[in-house]
Image (cartoon, rainbow, N blue to C red):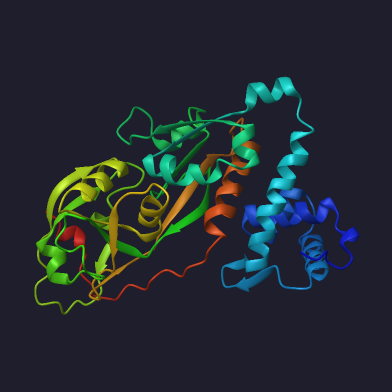
Amino acid sequence: MRPIKNAKKIDYNLIKVFDTVITEGNATRAARKLDVTPAAISQALLRLQNLYGEELFIRTRKGLVPSSKGKSLHQVFRQAIESIESTLCDKTDAQESNELIVLGSDITENYYFPALLDTVLMNRYIIKHYAIKKTGEYSPASMLTHGYADVIMGILEIKNEMIESYLIDNLSDFVCVCGEKSPLVGLEKISLYNFYAARHAVYHSDMFSSFTADSIDLFKSSTPYAGRREIGYYSDSLFGVIGVVEKSDMVAILPGKIVTYFRDVRRYNIKILRMPDEMIFRTLPVYAYLATNSTHYKNVKKLISTFQSTFLFSQEKQPDALVEGSTSLCDLSA
């Protein structure tokens, strides 16, 4: 890798501004966070962009979005910032405040956190993860504002004026997964007929509710008969659902990248099939929530920023458009 021209002109302030714009979502909020003018933010971004000689942000209707180069730089800059800040922390204070309580589901624990194991953040903090239950004594929002949790992750919306939400990932490209005992194992794509003829293993949890209950719409509303799915297994354990599919003739509908992870990294003996053309899935946004009054606010923001760099900014996919008049599968499931 060749050194960039004028590399000596890069200073920490430029890196800090760049990181804040990404973590805050736009230049205006970044300016408020850093207590500078929006013009100063724009000037800093322009200086950094000129040093690298290529665009670091793309302007869209939703504001500034990191370019491919910007995404890769942010991962490097975030670790550099964490390393610098770690040298300024008092060891006693760090020992007392380096625990972060995360509420989520087994997807959070078994898919998102393993990707962070080699990062500076995971070596610096003690992560305590618990599955959240909506039926508990406290609502998710009150658990954050009362300090019982530092961050909550999931696809459900938490609306509260004291809660900040950050998009960390998009679940899309849903696929059908089956095991070696399935009669569908030799196929590359499942037909609409086989979709309804097969028995389904369905995943659900309080923070990652059933994918096929409220997240799938039929693409063609002219389908003569939509049918009813036969549910053979219903679990809040992702391991349980994939394990049942691996050892039986059941199928499951899950996000493609999660299934690919379990097949390629966890080494499950499963087959991925494309979905019928008659079906289309809307993208499910995954959010991280934290309270503005959190005693671990800065640390949680670092955790969220790391998730964004690893999952959200590493690949960019546009949500599939839903067709007007489509039929929801939540009315079709058994």
* Residue 224 spot, x, y in % from top left: 9, 77
Picture residue at 66% right of the left edge, 22% below the top? 95
Specify the farthest residue to the bottom. Answer: 222
* Residue 293 spot, x, y in % from top left: 59, 34
Decide if residue 128 is on the left or right side of residue 18. left
* Residue 90 spot, x, y in % from top left: 76, 25
* Residue 66 spot, x, y in % from top left: 63, 65
Q: Quadrant of residue 238?
A: top left
Query: Relative to 53, is 108 above or below?
Result: above
Query: Relative to 326, is 128 above or below?
Result: above
Q: Considering depth in this image, is 49 or 323 the residue closer to the camera?
A: 49
Counting the numbered discs, the total is 0
Answer yes or no: is residue 162 visible.
no
Q: Considering depth in this image, is 283 or 54 the residue closer to the camera?
A: 54
Picture residue at 45% right of the left edge, 59% below the top? 170
Answer yes or no: is residue 232 visible.
yes
Query: Relative to 60, is 283 above or below?
Result: above
Q: Quadrant of the N terminus?
A: bottom right
Query: Relative to 110, is 228 above or below?
Result: below
Picture residue at 65% right of the left edge, 38% below the top? 298
Decide if residue 136 is on the left or right side of residue 178. right
Picture residue at 74% right of the left edge, 23% below the top? 91
